[in-house]
Image (cartoon, rainbow, N blue to C red):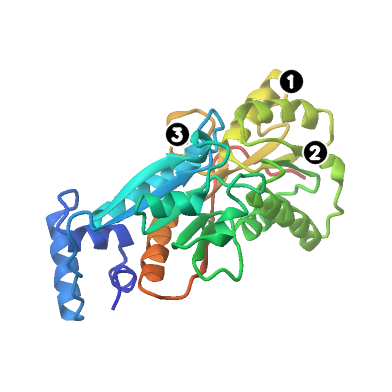
Amino acid sequence: MTIKEISEALNVSISTVSKALNDASDIAEETKTRIIEYASEVGYHLRTKSKVQRRICAMYERVDSDTRNNVLSHVISSFTDIAIANNYEVMIDYVVSKPEDFNLNDYLLQNNFCAAFIVGMNYKSRIFKQVKNTSVPLVLLDNRISDVPLISSVSSENTSAIVHAIKYLTKRGHKKIGFLMGETDSQVSAERLAGYIFGLARAGIEYNHDYIYHGDFTKSSGEEAAVFFAETDVTAVISCSDIMAMGLIDGFKACEKSVPDDISVIGFDDLNLLKFTSYDLTTMKQDFNRLGEQAFMQIEDMLEGRTSQQVMLECKLIERGTVKTIG
């Protein structure tokens, strides 16, 4: 019996089970008791670890005004919570702060890290090729590298999520659907673009490259994209991120286009900050908590000699007020 199996049996999160078994204070006593009693019934025994027996590095590619870091910070927070609850030390660091001759593997070994969680990496990253030579277990967020025993990955089902978004739009009468990409050198963008192309094909809609705008996951690129799409005949636009979708909505307003009356918009992420805005954005929700939890579980598995895996989590459509039925 594993923590994951206990969480599934009791319909609670992995981090909740972990906190209960480690007697954390930020969990309801009733929930803690229920989990501990069930774990005892099924014969689960919590491994005894010294406080900070192992060290994990959570490595960002960079930290800047790129608003995709809103996504990354949510995942890192979840990852850190469950790691600390299991008596690991987590240190957060950034590739951008390292010298030009930085070597990831040497850095991890010299600083006694038993594993690392790498987020925000793309094809142009200085460490993209280095990760294949790792001597310690790595988990990559949104990047999959095959046939390397010490590398696991966690990501959302990016392709199928966009296919679902297109199906949702076509059911509401939309046939001229634009697509706002993120960075062209990111695996996430490539997978979501593939979902756009595949989704159109499944809907019997001809692909039109003039309906695609290349952004960079920032709000300003969404505002620029709005000027582009306002000159087309699209009735809806799918954005690769919520932040760019917010920029789209603001940009359309500046172009005297109303959302959703003139153009419908779907985002991607379901960021917490949406609760504090008036965008009322329909979006594809990523489960940031589960992504972080699964990253930690993959590290634990590899440290215990289990095979590395590529874990992909489903996204959920959150209907709000930025899509209009037409026709």
Q: What residue is pinned by disc 2?
A: 234
Which numbered tag is attached to residue 283? none
Residue 285 in the image: x percent, y percent? 52, 49
Identity of the amino acid at label 3?
Leu
Label 2 to label 3, Cα distance in Å? 28 Å
10 Å crowding of disc 3: few (<14), some (14-19), many (20+):
few
* Nearer to the camera, 97 or 173: 97
- CB atoms of marks 2 and 3 within 8 Å: no
The 10 Å Cα crowd at callout 2, few under 14, some 14 to 19, many 20 or more, is some
Residue shown at 67%/52% (left/top)? 192
Is disc 3 placed on a helix, strand or loop? helix
The residue singled out by tag 3 in the image is 273
Please tell me which of labels 1 and 3 falls first in the chain: 1
- Is 300 left, or right, of 97 in this rendering? left
What residue is at 41 percent from the left and 46 percent from the top?
76
- Which quarter shows the N terminus? bottom left
Which residue, given by chain and number where applicable, does mark 1 sit on?
255
User: Tag 1: Cα neighbours inside 10 Å, few (<14), some, or many (≥20)?
Assistant: some
